[in-house]
């Protein structure tokens, strides 16, 4: 998702706006829909904010959802940081490379390319259609048990680059990364979990990058939005993982794919 950096100190006019913005970010960040696109749609329509203002707010709110994922996975994060086992040490190295690739891919796109939101939304819709097809095929072959898949180095490189591509307006970071893992035979729970873990360093890097590049000091309304995004995001993570444990793999594919396509449909009316 692409964000335009402006000073947001005058953008958050009321507590109501702040709560709504945080609520949207916390709910939409983990779903295969563009949180930026949906926030622009709602905030422009309800509060008369400009698209530039809303997308600038969105990147700061990643601090909230980043903290939500960090707190939810705090025990696993500690194990990863200290390399408690060879597997966790390996995951630490892969997360580092994925985050580095995210920056290497995403920063040039943000700085030098002016990509229309329509391209990102079309790509997201195509990803959704592919997920639906994958899910329906899996339904016909449900005898094949999803035992999970390996997070290999080649796949880690693909995921890091894909997360960087999410700077393109209309693309969903979580939708893209989760879809790739579902295509590679990860279980729904493992795909969500790894995508959530990937989001932690990426979210902090994006938010602090905004602070360093733009040099703004968030006001209390922005802080309130980030807090709400963190609380709602924490609850959303738990809900999604619970759903992933109870629902068949093919249903997860079809459900996520349908969300991506439905999110794209309103653009046909514009």
Image (cartoon, rainbow, N blue to C red):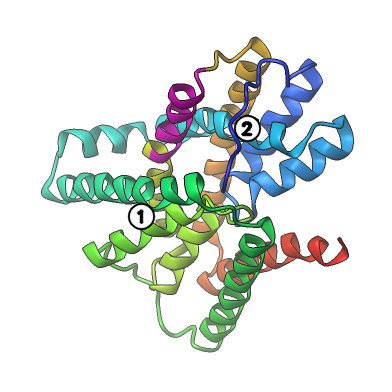
Q: Which residues are magenta?
A: 202-215
Could you tell me which residue is drawn at 54 percent across and 58 percent down?
175
10 Å crowding of disc 1: few (<14), some (14-19), many (20+)? many
Q: Determine which quarter of the picture holds residue 160.
A: bottom left
Mark before the other along the chain sequence, 1 or 2: 2
What is the spatial separation of the Cα atoms under label 1 and label 2, in whole angstroms?
23 Å
Q: Is residue 239 above or below residue 175?
A: above
| Front position in the image: 38 or 108 | 108
Q: Quadrant of the C terminus?
A: bottom right
Image position of 118 (left or right of 166):
right
Name the residue carrying label 1.
Answer: 160
Q: Judge whether residue 189 can be spotted in this image.
A: no
Could you tell me which residue is drawn at 61 percent across and 61 percent down?
120
Residue 180 place in picture, x, y as percent: 44, 67
- The circle drawn on residue 56 is 2
Residue 45 place in picture, x, y as percent: 87, 39
- Furthest toward the left, the residue is 86
Image position of 9 (left or right of 194):
right
Q: Is residue 250 above or below residue 211?
A: below
């Amino acid at each position: 998702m692409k964000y335009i950096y402006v000073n947001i100190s005058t953008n958050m006019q009321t507590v109501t706006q702040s709560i709504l913005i945080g609520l949207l970010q916390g709910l939409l960040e983990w779903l295969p829909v563009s949180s930026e696109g949906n926030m622009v749609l709602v905030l422009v329509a309800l509060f008369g904010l400009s698209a530039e203002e809303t997308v600038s707010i969105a990147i700061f709110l990643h601090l909230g959802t980043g903290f939500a994922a960090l707190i939810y996975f705090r025990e696993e994060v500690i194990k990863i940081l200290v390399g408690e086992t060879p597997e966790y040490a390996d995951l630490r190295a892969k997360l580092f490379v994925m985050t580095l690739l995210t920056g290497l891919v995403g920063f040039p796109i943000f700085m030098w390319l002016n990509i229309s939101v329509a391209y990102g939304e079309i790509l997201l819709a195509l990803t959704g259609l592919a997920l639906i097809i994958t899910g329906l095929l899996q339904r016909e072959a449900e005898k094949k048990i999803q035992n999970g898949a390996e997070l290999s180095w080649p796949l880690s490189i693909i995921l890091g680059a894909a997360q960087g591509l999410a700077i393109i307006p209309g693309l969903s970071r979580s939708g893209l990364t989760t879809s790739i893992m579902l295509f590679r035979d990860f279980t729904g729970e493992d795909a969500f979990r790894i995508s959530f873990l990937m989001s932690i360093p990426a979210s902090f890097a994006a938010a602090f990058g905004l602070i360093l590049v733009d040099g703004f000091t968030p006001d209390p309304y922005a802080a309130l939005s980030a807090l709400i995004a963190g609380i709602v995001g924490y609850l959303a993570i738990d809900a999604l993982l619970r759903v992933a444990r109870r629902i068949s793999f093919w249903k997860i594919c079809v459900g996520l794919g349908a969300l991506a396509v439905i999110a794209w449909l309103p653009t046909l009316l514009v």
